[in-house]
Amino acid sequence: MRFSVAEIFFEREYGMERKPVSQNDAPIYDALKRFHKSRVVPFDVPGHKRGQGNPELRELLGEACVANDVNSMKPLDNLCHPVSVIREAEMLAAEAFQAAHAFFMVGGTTSAVQAMIFSVVKRGDKIILPRNVHRSVINAMILCGAVPVYVNPDMDARLGIPLGMKISQVEAALNRHPDAKAVLVNNPTYYGICSDLRYIVKLAHARGMKVLADEAHGTHFYFQKYLPVSAMEAGADLAAVSMHKSGGSLTQSSFLLAGPGVSAGYVRQVINLTQTTSGSYLLMTSLDISRRNLAIRGEEEFWKVMKMAQYARDEINSIGGYYAFSKELVNNDSVYDFDVTKLSVYTLDIGLAGIEVYDLLRDEYDIQIEFGDLGNILAYISIGDRIKHIERLVSALAEINRRFKRDKTGLLTQEYLSPEVAVSPQEAFYAEKESLPLMESEGHICSEFVMCYPPGIPILAPGERITRDILDHIRYAKEKGCSMTGTEDPDINYLNVLKHPAGIP
Amino acid sequence: MEMWFTEKHTPDVKFSIRVDRQLYTGQSEFQRIDVFESPEFGRFLTLDGYMMLTERDEFIYHEMIVHVPMAVHPAAKNVLVIGAGDGGVIRELCRYPEIEQIDMVEIDPLVVAVCREYLPQTACRLGDERVRIFYEDGLKFVRSKSNQYDLIIVDSTDPFGPGEGLFTKEFYGNCYKALNEDGVMVNQHESPFYADDAIACQRAHKRIVESFPISRVYQAHIPTYPSGHWLFGFASKKYHPLKDLKADRWKAREMKTRYYTAELHRGAFMLPAYVEEMLEDVE
């Protein structure tokens, strides 16, 4: 029975007759459309009031965009405590991703990664993970005080890239640290390498540990059966998915997926510890619409992406000098599977570091690829690509080979250096520190990060010992032109190191 | 009753031709293709609503893009033509008996089929035994070629749509590689007058200058293109378009042309001051 005026008003104005909700629906998008029809007068935030207060913004972004930039209110639900349209949208997302629960995240995949870590570990708890993780993972450990137990990924000797986690190494780590609370896996790594996630889940669950998956680069795994297994299908407990990478939604919008083994209510509380109370409806609708797009057309769209990536690989490999690698790397262990939508190319044979090719593509040919590091480049092929642009990328690579090819002696190959963890990240970050010139810091324990971005995978993290190899790597990366970050000194000439590392020589 | 074809040369400038009847309309994988019949210009072809050629004035474009390089290069035997689906460039090239091979790379087979049917004036030599037609993306075709051609003619549409790859730096670099050591490349170079065309023109010039040691621009007056003033690029590894012009040799061929003459050849390279300035700005 309905009694209150408010309820009757809501029912009449916003229509309580809901048809059954399916993947063809986009509840947040529909709610916004209904809301616009009712032409409500805004006396709430945001202050630009559908762009009236900021004509330049309206001009730049367009009427539709600024009109959809609204505040949370009853007909539009509330991201921090969804009960209606956002809840429905989350249920649809969970169904589309075969998860028990899905959370709309407006703080990027960083917020999803950190929430999933905070949900399973607290100060002093151990978490087993590979060292080639995104900075957001280690940042999470700094904040909550968890302790990393690193499984060193194998390296590919020729390509110099870190691979996935070998089962034998994961098992050894689990046996050495039976009190660990969770295992975190990259699914896939930046380059597209996958570990045997299903087996890792089996091993971890047998010991009562949770499994977290950083699937920032694996959104498409959920929608194409010929791609590697997704975290939810493999039985992982939580997965962070970058809808804005291969999913097609706006930048900074992501999903956090949860399996049946975690309490969704608790995860929501954890998310709310740091989440903004002014979640953007632009980001939320884009997640909703993109989820619908992938649920309906994903299989077909990602099949096209796979074909385009293979076409690009074949063309690049026929130029000569480049090696665009793919599934031939699979060895059923450290490379259990490979994400064939990734266009990763080894460039050292033409005498150029990946970062140099990355810069040449941008400066000479107006082509912006995802990134380049010491020996490889990565181009993102996605649902938005067309063959004619792939032709441009391939032709530009052919030209770079012809015009800039050099002798390859003296080029560094190895991307990955094994860390020596002396102190936990939280302890190191907040410890008393001193600033030393880069080349005088050897042997000390670092209290900050040093990394190239992209990919944002730390070369040095708080609590790790600074070695000669690491310093050479940093110097080389700077020389070759990598964008670097993490240190208090913006020029990376000084490092902050621990002043009085207790009991550590 | 009056039917008019209208094209917007800028958001504020329109160009219209009265149409007698439409002969063909179709949509290929790449673009919309239309052929009309008009009292003033005869039959004309448009792609995606943009004027490509008319029977009445096509001789200007086709003569200027072919005879200028052919009067300079002493011995062009192998020619690559990119675009040119209407066949006009091929027709002019076929008048040179010493040319042995003409490779034409047109991305849209439907354009060729439509022109064969409705524009015999330009398509008449497409069946010449020296001509091989490849239905492929020109950018993709040329990147696998090395030291193979004496002359490359880039008879493209505009730098948006299917033709955009043909205005890129990597394309010009690929053409350089595909040419022999004394090779020449000429291209459709847009126009200096209206803002958007001028930017495209400058951009193309910059990229060509960065790819070839000799890079000059010449002009022609084409009534049915925006502003009527149109440009071509002459890029070369060795021959200078004026210093190496063999006027007497060309005249001795006694080839009848209606726009091009060996004297006009020189004048074509004498550009208005604002155009020279615009090009120098990016050199």
Image (cartoon, rainbow, N blue to C red):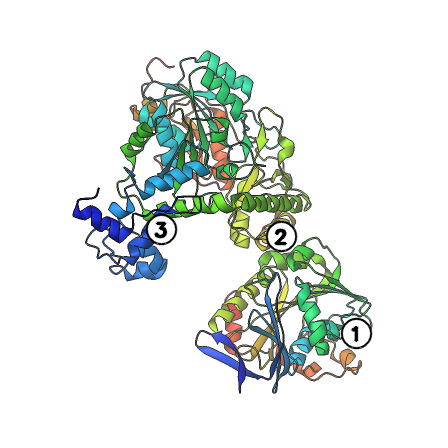
- In the rendered image, which residue does mark 2 sit on? A395
Q: Amino acid at mark 3?
A: Asp
Looking at the figure, which quarter contains the C terminus of chain B? bottom right
Expressed as whole percent of the image width and height from the top left, the position of residue B17 reads 55, 83
In percent of the image, x 67 and y 54: which residue is there? B143
In what element is the residue under mark 3? helix
Q: Do badges 1 and 3 share one subunit? A: no
Closer to the camera, A206 or A144? A206
Residue B247 in view of the camera: yes
Of the residues tagged 2 and 3, which is closer to the observer?
3
The Cα–Cα distance between marks 2 and 1, rounded to whole angstroms, is 32 Å
Protein chain holding label 1: B
User: In the rendered view, does A471 fall on the left or right side of A272?
Assistant: right
- In the rendered image, which residue does mark 1 sit on? B96
User: In the rendered view, does A242 fall on the left or right side of A75?
Assistant: right
Q: Which mark is residue A30?
A: 3
Image quarter of residue B115: bottom right
Protein chain holding label 3: A
In what element is the residue under mark 2? helix
Q: Amino acid at mark 2?
A: Ser
Above or below: residue B131 compared with residue A493: below
Image quarter of residue A61: bottom left
In percent of the image, x 59 and y 28: which residue is there? A156
In percent of the image, x 35 and y 55: which residue is there? A65
